[in-house]
Image (cartoon, rainbow, N blue to C red):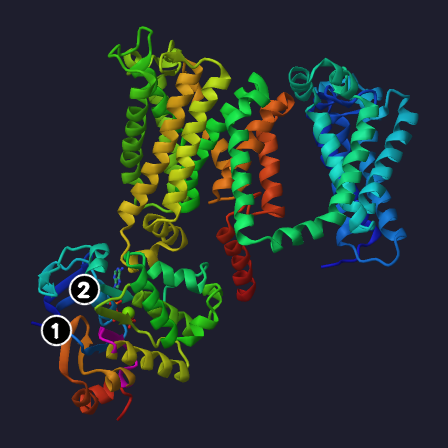
């Protein structure tokens, strides 16, 4: 059974029908990416899975359990974590305090210490800036911090919403390398990206989302060669 | 950053300083304070507040000023001081020429006499101008003299003026603790004896010089102490502190203990509101509601009067019920405001505070809550059959409450819930995206805050033995909020300092009580300008404020 199974979900914002029947699966250990244009419903999909929004129809099962209606704060204890769009770090807290905040749902001191080491190994920049106030970090560093903070919850499923947004190419590489590394260490990844090329180059599989519907689903390599994807998302003619 | 000032700017500063003293004078504040003589035959608290404004303006201006040589700042100080006297001089001439009390009822002959030193207007004005000029020079000189003289000087001034201000209370303490003989030496009438004042001033001055010199080597010695020894020392300090706290009523005497109890009641409330406002960042302006609920529950359950339930409740059995009821109300009142933020939250909670009071006054519950007549004959707490009547006995009830509250607040701050409060305060959206349960986090803050306030109210009711709805007005919410801000938002020790300054001082200086709101206003404005993080800030908060400034700066 897949780790995450999303089955024909419909999510509304009031009257706005944002998700019109999305189905997707994520297997344990995979990197799955969700690509699509602005407003396609990528963020809405992640927010629905993580329990911040409730779908009006459809089912979501995570680790074999139906989680529709389970609030976000309960899912954190089920080892599901999300890095929200636009980084969302606590601007006035230090790097260290932000990371500590990420482990608020845990009690195991040893595990927390180990994960902190892991985060610092992955993002040495954060170690250097341990005491710096998060709001004064560069955009890329804030993205690293947000990712690091989500890792502090030691998630089994980590969902990232556009981690490359607004980053210089060098930093995009660094962040994506880190995602691959996190995945290698055993965390399953669901990655939302507009930078389709980068996303498809690290993912196993991909879904293409258009105005609230999945229009394509394939192995990442296949999608990269798909004509429509190349035209619409990879900027090739 | 140092600046250069033009003559015009300096004169403007002087006029500004003058406007401040003029305002203090025409509202009657100075004349009222003049009744408290500090050093017999020399000067009163009125004089201190008369010269405070030119002193402050001259000090700040010369501190920020760029200069070479020492003549310039002294001269500037003189000008600021002298100019500041002009509005007062005009006032005293006007008072002679026309019947000024028609417009400004507080410009009393006593005030004019104070301003002119009992001389003719002309001579008095010259004296006032000279005095203010000298004060300006004196203030400026603080920026010139070397640190090793300034520090002892400031210390000696503050301590001497401090004990002089409270000489009336000190006098009674000295009399009962140390005997009448000493009273004659130290005091003269209700004020400080001039000779003692000089000796005391010199002693503090000398001691500080000695301490500053020796202090460094002393500190070094402390740091070089073996860890075990150092631990012993800090344990010793804690034990000493505990002993002092335990025997405080003996040292303070009953009047000061009563003041301490009132301060304690506010500390309890402050610790609770500090959780809501300081930890969780929810601005609650109706906090008095829970204080009232705690008090009324205690009243209804234990009163021996007509309104009492007569169900055999004692203070100790009613106490937890008061806390529980207040907590429940905290949750009930918390639910409707869950979705609100900032300004909206403040306004709605403000409404709650008033509703509770209005309900208490209303005829609707007159049969249970007593309407405007309130609830009477609430018994004092009993402890193993002894009724705790004296302030020195009630002190321990308040103390127990405060210690419990400090313990709980500290534990909560460092707990998982404390983390969630911090996240909520910092950024509600991020906290939500991280999967925090905002509903329970907010409700827990309201509930804990209400519990502390309810405890405080219950003790208050039993201590006073009667409660009236008008005691639970908006002013209490404002008091508590102000004391948190003054002490340092989010800081637990700050609550103590804030309560001492905003509740303790006005009780000791009855003159201040009349101008309480004015003083709060001024104090809050000054705090925001000079020390926005509060007197005893939480370390993290302090850094946050600093980083906020940095962030603002980076944005520009
Ligand atoms: N809170 C909201 N209220 C109303 N409509 C919303 C809300 N949030 C999103 N929408 C709408 O839902 C649709 C999907 O939005 P969503 O944020 O999921 O897009 P996205 O794929 O993440 O886009 P982007 O790449 O720009 O982040 C959009 O049409 C958007 O306008
Ligand atoms: Mg989005």
**Local SS, label 1:** strand
Disc number placed over residue A138 in the picture, else none: none
Closer-to-camera residue (B429/B436) = B436
Q: Does residue B147 appear in this view?
A: yes
Q: Is residue A67 left or right of residue A189?
A: left
Q: Are marks 2 and 1 on the same chain?
A: yes
Task: Name the residue at 27% across, 57% down.
Answer: B435
Question: Quick check: A133 left or right of B76?
Answer: left
Q: Position of residue A187 (x, y in %)?
A: 23, 73
Tell me the distance, in whole angstroms, between the alpha carbons under discs 2 and 1. 11 Å
| Image quadrant in which you'd find residue B385 | top left
Q: Chain of mark 1?
A: A
- Tell me where residue B73 appears, x and y as whole percent: 84, 50
The magenta span reads: A185-197
Q: How many marks?
A: 2
Q: Is residue A191 magenta?
A: yes
Q: Is residue B42 left or right of residue B325?
A: right
> Image point 32% across, 23% down: which residue?
B319
Name the foreground residue: B379 vs B522. Answer: B379
Q: Residue at x 28, y 15 (%)?
A: B313
For mark 1, does the 10 Å Cα neighbourhood hold few (<14), some (14 to 19), or many (20 or more) residues?
A: some
Mark 2 lies on residue: A49
Image vertical order of residue A66 relative to residue B317, above or below: below
Q: What element does badge 2 sit on?
A: helix
Residue B473 seen in the current view:
no
Which quadrant does the C terminus of chain B fall into?
A: bottom right
Is B457 magenta? The answer is: no
For the view shown, which residue lies furthest in the top direction?
B306
Asked if A49 appears above or below B280 in the picture, the reply is below
Q: Which mark is residue A25?
A: 1
């Amino acid at each position: 059974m897949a780790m995450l199974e999303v089955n024909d979900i419909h999510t509304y914002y009031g009257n706005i029908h944002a998700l019109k029947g999305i189905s997707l699966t994520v297997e344990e250990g995979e990197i799955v990416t969700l690509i699509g244009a602005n407003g396609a419903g990528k963020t809405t999909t992640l927010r629905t899975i993580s329990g911040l929004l409730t779908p009006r129809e459809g089912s979501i099962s995570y680790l074999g359990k139906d989680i529709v209606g389970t609030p976000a704060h309960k899912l954190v204890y089920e080892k599901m974590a999300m890095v929200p769009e636009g980084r969302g770090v606590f601007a006035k807290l230090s790097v260290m305090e932000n990371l500590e905040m990420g482990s608020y749902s845990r009690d195991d001191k040893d595990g927390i210490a180990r994960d902190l080491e892991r985060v610092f190994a992955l993002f040495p920049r954060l170690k250097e800036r341990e005491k710096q106030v998060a709001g004064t970090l560069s955009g890329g560093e804030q993205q690293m911090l947000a990712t690091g903070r989500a890792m502090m919850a030691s998630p089994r499923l980590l969902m990232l919403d556009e981690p490359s947004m607004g980053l210089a190419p060098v930093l995009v590489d660094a962040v994506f390398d880190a995602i691959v590394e996190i995945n290698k260490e055993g965390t399953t990844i669901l990655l939302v990206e507009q930078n389709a090329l980068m996303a498809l180059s690290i993912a196993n599989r991909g879904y293409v989302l258009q105005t609230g519907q999945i229009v394509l689903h394939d192995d990442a390599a296949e999608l990269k060669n798909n004509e429509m994807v190349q035209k619409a998302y990879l900027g090739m003619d | 950053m140092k600046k250069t000032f033009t003559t015009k700017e300096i004169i403007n500063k002087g006029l500004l300083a003058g406007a401040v003293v003029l305002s203090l004078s025409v509202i009657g504040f100075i004349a009222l304070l003049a009744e408290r003589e500090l050093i017999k035959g020399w000067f009163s608290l009125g004089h201190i507040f008369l010269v405070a404004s030119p002193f402050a303006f001259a000090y700040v201006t010369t501190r920020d000023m760029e200069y070479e040589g020492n003549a310039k700042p002294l001269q500037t100080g003189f000008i600021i001081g002298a100019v500041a006297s002009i509005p007062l001089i005009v006032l005293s001439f006007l008072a002679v020429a026309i019947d000024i009390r028609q417009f400004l009822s507080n410009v009393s002959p006593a005030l004019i006499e104070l301003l002119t030193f009992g001389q003719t207007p002309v001579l008095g004005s010259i004296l006032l101008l000279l005095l203010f000029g000298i004060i300006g020079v004196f203030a400026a000189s603080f920026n010139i003299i070397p640190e090793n003289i300034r520090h002892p000087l400031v210390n000696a001034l503050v301590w001497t003026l401090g004990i002089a201000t409270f000489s009336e209370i000190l006098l009674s303490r000295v009399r009962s603790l140390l005997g009448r003989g000493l009273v004659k030496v130290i005091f003269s009438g209700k004020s400080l004896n001039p000779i003692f004042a000089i000796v005391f001033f010199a002693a503090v001055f000398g001691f500080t010089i000695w301490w500053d010199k020796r202090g460094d080597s002393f500190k070094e010695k402390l740091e070089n102490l073996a860890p075990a020894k150092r631990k012993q020392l800090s344990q010793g300090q804690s034990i000493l502190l505990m002993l002092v706290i335990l025997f405080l009523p003996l040292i303070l005497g009953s009047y000061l203990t009563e003041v301490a109890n009132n301060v304690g009641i506010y500390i309890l409330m402050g610790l609770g509101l500090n959780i809501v406002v300081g930890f969780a960042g929810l601005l609650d302006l109706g906090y008095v509601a829970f204080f009232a609920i705690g008090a009324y529950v205690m009243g209804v359950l234990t009163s021996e009067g007509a309104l009492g339930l007569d169900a055999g409740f004692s203070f100790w059995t009613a106490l937890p019920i008061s806390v529980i009821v207040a907590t429940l109300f905290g949750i009930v009142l918390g639910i409707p405001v869950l979705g609100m933020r900032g300004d909206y939250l403040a306004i709605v909670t403000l409404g709650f505070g008033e509703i509770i009071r209005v309900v208490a006054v209303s005829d609707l519950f007159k049969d249970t809550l007593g309407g405007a007549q309130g609830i009477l004959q609430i018994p004092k707490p009993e402890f193993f059959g002894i009724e705790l009547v004296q302030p020195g006995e009630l002190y321990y009830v308040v103390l127990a409450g405060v210690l419990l509250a400090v313990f709980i607040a500290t534990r909560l701050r460092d707990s998982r819930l404390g983390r969630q409060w911090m996240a909520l305060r910092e950024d509600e959206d991020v906290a939500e995206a991280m999967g925090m349960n905002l509903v329970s986090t907010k409700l827990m803050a309201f509930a804990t805050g209400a519990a502390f306030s309810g405890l405080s109210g219950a003790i208050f009711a039993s201590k006073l033995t009667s409660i009236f709805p008008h005691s639970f007005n908006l002013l209490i919410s404002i008091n508590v909020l102000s004391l948190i801000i003054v002490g340092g938002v989010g800081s637990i020790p700050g609550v103590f300092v804030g309560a001492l300054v905003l509740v303790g001082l006005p009780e000791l200086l009855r003159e201040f009580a009349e101008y309480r709101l004015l003083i709060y206003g001024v104090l809050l404005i000054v705090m925001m300008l000079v020390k926005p993080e509060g007197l005893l800030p939480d370390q993290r908060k302090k850094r946050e404020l600093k980083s906020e400034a940095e962030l603002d700066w980076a944005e520009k």
